[in-house]
Image (cartoon, rainbow, N blue to C red):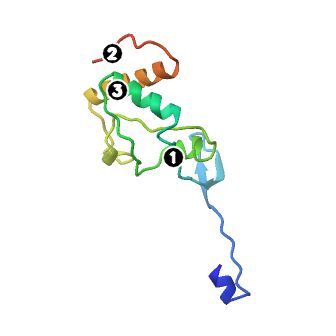
Amino acid sequence: MKIGKDDPEFCATVCPRMVTEISYTGYQNEVQKCHPPWITDENHLFVRKTVEALCTVGQTPKIKYWRFGTDGSMTAGMLGIPTIGYSGGEECYAHTPQEKISIDKMIKALEGYYSIVAAMLDLKLRRTFT
């Protein structure tokens, strides 16, 4: 560390930010605010099966990074569980007071979720919702 080389008396500690969380019951607890970044390789079987499943129902998924936080920080970033993001919503509205989705997009997303689950369980896709 450059500062340590220039000033041998320099000492620093880096700690995650701590915040007090309050549950709906009023219980309070101090917790670390930790949101590690994560990515699931696009060649991972989970990703490939998901893309194939969505294509079978006429969707053309894009593999890209989301610019907002998700629970994937816990599942993938902390627990190492392969994780993807899929939504019928628009990224520009994610986690804002204007977050919304049209009924048509919600039905399309439901169809997508159904196809993903069917693919993961090796089930035949029996029907679509549109």
Label 2 sits on a secondary structure element that is loop
Q: Nearer the viewer, residue 31 or 122?
A: 122
Q: CA distance from mark 1 to mark 3?
A: 21 Å
Identity, as a three-letter code, of the amino acid under mark 3: Cys
In this view, which residue lies farthest toward the front?
A: 43
Tell me how far mark 2 sits from mark 1, CA to CA. Answer: 30 Å
Q: Whole-percent x and y of residue 89?
A: 33, 37
The correct choice, above or below, for 17 with respect to 11 in the image is above
Q: Indicate the secondary structure of the residue bearing disc 1.
A: loop
| Frontmost residue, 94 versus 87 | 87
Identify the residue under disc 2: 128
**Which tag is nearer the camera, tag 2 or tag 1?**
1
**Residue type indicated by callout 1:** Ile
- The reply to whether discs 2 and 3 touch (Cβ–Cβ < 8 Å) is no
Name which residue lies at 39% across and 10% down.
126
Lower position in the chain sequence, tag 2 or tag 1: 1
On the image, the x and y values in percent for residue 90 come to 31, 41
Label ID, residue 39: 1
Within 10 Å of disc 2 (Cα), the crowding (few <14, some 14-19, many 20+) is few
Quadrant position of residue 109: top left
- Residue 79 horizontal/vertical position (percent): 64, 42
| Circle on res. 55 | 3
